Image (cartoon, rainbow, N blue to C red):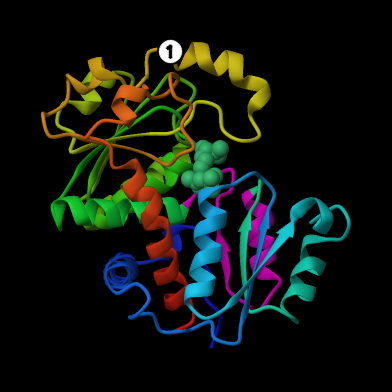
Amino acid sequence: MRKKDLLTLFDYSTEDIRGILALAAKLKEGRGVSEKRVLSGKTGVMIFEKPSLRTRISFETAIVELGGHPINLASESVGMGIRESIEDVARNLERVVHLIVARTFAHETLTRLAAACSVPVINALTDTSHPCQALAFGLTMQEERGAKRLSVAFVGDGNNVCCSIMALCAKLGHKITITGPKGYEPPAATINICKEICASTGGEVLVTGDPGAAVRDADVIYTDVWTSMGQEAEAGVREKAFGGYQVNAALIARAPKDVMVSHCLPAHRGEEITSDVLDSDASVAYDEAENRLHVQKAVITHLFS
Ligand code: CP
Ligand code: NVA
């Protein structure tokens, strides 16, 4: 049987995603009891080309709780594509380990790694997507609102996290409205793929420059940093461009009373979100951070079943 990976949510059907979220909810409820030890006697290696707190600890814990042994590799010492080719890294790893979790700059590094090896590869964030984050958001929304069709307002940068949240919404038939400054929208090709998916799921993808209009009927407002890892040189320009797109009390006041707020974290408090909002009762960001563990256990179980 061909091995399975998790590279983007576009490779997964609506049914796969619903199955993973249902399993994640079960694993969360029965933590320590209900896991199938699908990684028993197996090793999972984690390679991070960028910093990480949540992804690293949640994958390491997930691998241990599924009976496996995690190995953390310092990406500088592996030197994918520098010390040796990406394909040679893959061909060596597959001889020793059973699972690869990788956070890379270029998405192509991840797809080349996956194409060159026979063991499952999981996307731990690339420059274009963060599927595990979107699944954690999906689980959090399932806990908060059950099977309701949601209206999601994404305020800010149309980058990796936005694209994966958009993919999740399209697959699950939610409405998503993205609002941010001109020039920082998600790539047109990604928007178009999501719109095509929506034609069969009943979802909707809208893009507007008006944050007030975007949050008017929102069940949840989502945001991410204005300057992502690797874009540090653009920080000054971005801060100016995104100035009108802060998730703050004034924006929340334009949304329905019971609106929720989430963020993939790390947050740059005082930039894309204010502390009063992130720390308010409306915030589900830390629930979502915890849910990374449960969805990743479900993803690994799915890949090894
Ligand atoms: N949200 C997220 O992926 O966090 P880290 O970058 O800390 O892993
Ligand atoms: N967009 C952010 C997400 C971090 C989890 C980044 O890529 O840095």
Q: Position of residue 68 (x, y in %)?
A: 57, 78
Magenta span includes 168: no
Instruction: In the rendered view, tell whether residue 115 sits above or below residue 182.
Output: below
What is the secondary structure assignment of the residue under circle 1? Answer: loop
In the image, what residue occupies the spot 42% across and 23% down? 272
Q: Is the C terminus in the top left, top right, bottom left or bottom right quadrant?
A: bottom left
In the image, what residue occupies the spot 37% across and 19% down? 245
Label 1 Cα neighbours within 10 Å, binned few <14 / some 14-19 / many ≥20: some
In the image, what residue occupies the spot 44% across and 29% down? 185
Q: Is residue 190 visible?
A: yes
Instruction: In the rendered view, tell whether residue 12 sits above or below residue 95.
Output: above
Span of residues in magenta: 107-130
The amino acid type of the residue labelled 1 equals Gly
In the image, what residue occupies the spot 61% across and 35% down? 229
- Residue 216's quadrant in the figure? top left
Q: Is residue 82 left or right of residue 217?
A: right
- Along the viewing direction, whichever of 235 and 249 lies nearer the viewer: 249
Magenta span includes 117: yes
In the picture as drawn, the residue positioned furthest to the right comes out as 83
- Residue 206's quadrant in the figure? top left
Q: Is residue 74 left or right of residue 70?
A: right
Q: Which residue is mark 1?
A: 243
Q: Is residue 94 left or right of residue 2?
A: right
Q: Position of residue 34 (x, y in %)?
A: 33, 80
Instruction: In the rendered view, tell whether residue 159 sits above or below residue 112.
Output: above
